[in-house]
Image: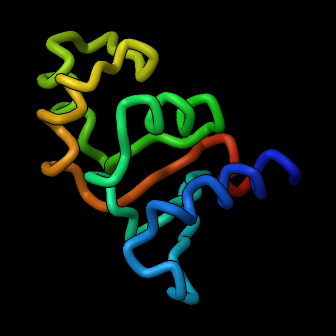
């Protein structure tokens, strides 16, 4: 629980509307957070989110693969150049399999 709260506190700074009462959803063992302002993030922020168990975008793996140029991408390989190329084209969602329902 402590790790989830830490992650949510980190994510709060990137919310488009921090006062939104219902920014989350859960489905198919995946926990979603909507309304995230991805352009505010840096590549380092995305890597930190990955370490915390969250990924950016929503069902956009093909686009992400194209940006990385490899279907075996990992967020640890993210550079500012790649992030600048993709951040405005991703949906405003973060998702986690780690914190999804069981």
Q: Residue furthest right?
A: 2
Q: Is residue 13 left or right of residue 37?
A: right
Exactly how many numbered labels are in the figure? Answer: 0
Q: Which of the 4 image quarters holds residue 36?
A: bottom left
Estimate the x, y position of residue 53 in percent, counting from the top left.
62, 37
Residue name at image x 37 percent, y 13 percent: 77
Residue name at image x 56 percent, y 65 percent: 12
Residue name at image x 51 percent, y 86 percent: 20
Residue name at image x 49 percent, y 51 percent: 95
- Residue in front for this viewpoint, 94 or 17: 17
- Residue in front for this viewpoint, 96 or 29: 96
Estimate the x, y position of residue 86 in percent, counting from the top left.
17, 38
Q: Is residue 30 left or right of residue 90?
A: right
- Residue in front for this viewpoint, 27 or 81: 81
Q: Is residue 66 left or right of residue 36?
A: left
Q: How is the image coloured?
A: rainbow
The image shows residue 17, relative to residue 30, as above or below, that is below
The image shows residue 91, relative to residue 73, as above or below, that is below
The image shows residue 100, relative to residue 54, as above or below, that is below
Q: Is residue 8 left or right of residue 90?
A: right
Estimate the x, y position of residue 67 in percent, counting from the top left.
15, 24
């Amino acid at each position: 629980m402590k790790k989830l709260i830490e992650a949510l506190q980190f994510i709060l700074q990137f919310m488009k509307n921090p006062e939104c009462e219902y920014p989350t959803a859960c489905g198919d063992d995946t926990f979603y957070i909507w309304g995230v302002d991805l352009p505010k993030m840096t590549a380092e922020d995305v890597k930190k989110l990955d370490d915390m168990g969250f990924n950016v975008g929503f069902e956009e793996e093909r686009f992400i693969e194209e940006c990385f140029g490899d279907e075996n991408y990992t967020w640890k390989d993210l550079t500012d150049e790649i992030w600048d190329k993709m951040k405005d084209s991703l949906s405003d969602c973060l998702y986690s399999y780690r914190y999804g329902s069981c």
